[in-house]
Amino acid sequence: MRLDAYDVVMRLRRVISELRGAPFCEVKVRLLRHAGREARVEGEYALRSLFSSVEEGEFEAVLDEELNPISVSIRPRAKPSVRAWVAR
């Protein structure tokens, strides 16, 4: 399995955005590791609606060898943090 960080981030953005019903999603990956034919990913996400923060939290995901999500676990924070996320 070849892991391309850009592809992983883009797929996770799309999946989390669809799961939570927000138009924009930023993803920061903290941990990306192989587990057999799967990849385990941990990190943070921030959902946005135009320029306001809607929700922030942490996620854990398991991706198959084609980087399709097998499972995604989302843990929203009680309140969005004040710190700014920089789009990359």
Image (cartoon, grey):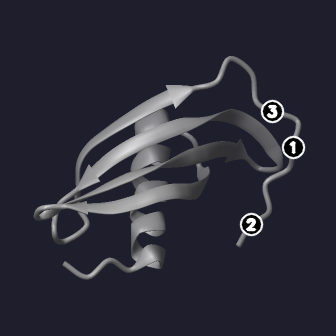
Q: Which tag is nearer the camera, tag 2 or tag 1?
A: 1
Q: Which residue is mark 1?
A: 83
Q: Is residue 35 above or below residue 78?
A: below
Residue placed most toward the observer, 47 or 45 = 45
Q: Mark 2: which amino acid?
A: Ala
Residue appearing at x 26%, y 82% in the figure: 2
Q: Mark 3: which amino acid?
A: Ser
Q: Are marks 1 and 3 in contact (CB under 8 Å)?
A: yes
User: Residue 45 location, x and y as percent?
Assistant: 59, 46
Residue 81 tag number: 3
Residue appearing at x 88%, y 36% in the figure: 82
Element class at badge 1: loop
Which quadrant does the C terminus fall into? Answer: bottom right
Residue placed most toward the observer, 44 or 48 = 44
Residue appearing at x 38%, y 80% in the figure: 4
Residue appearing at x 18%, y 71% in the figure: 66
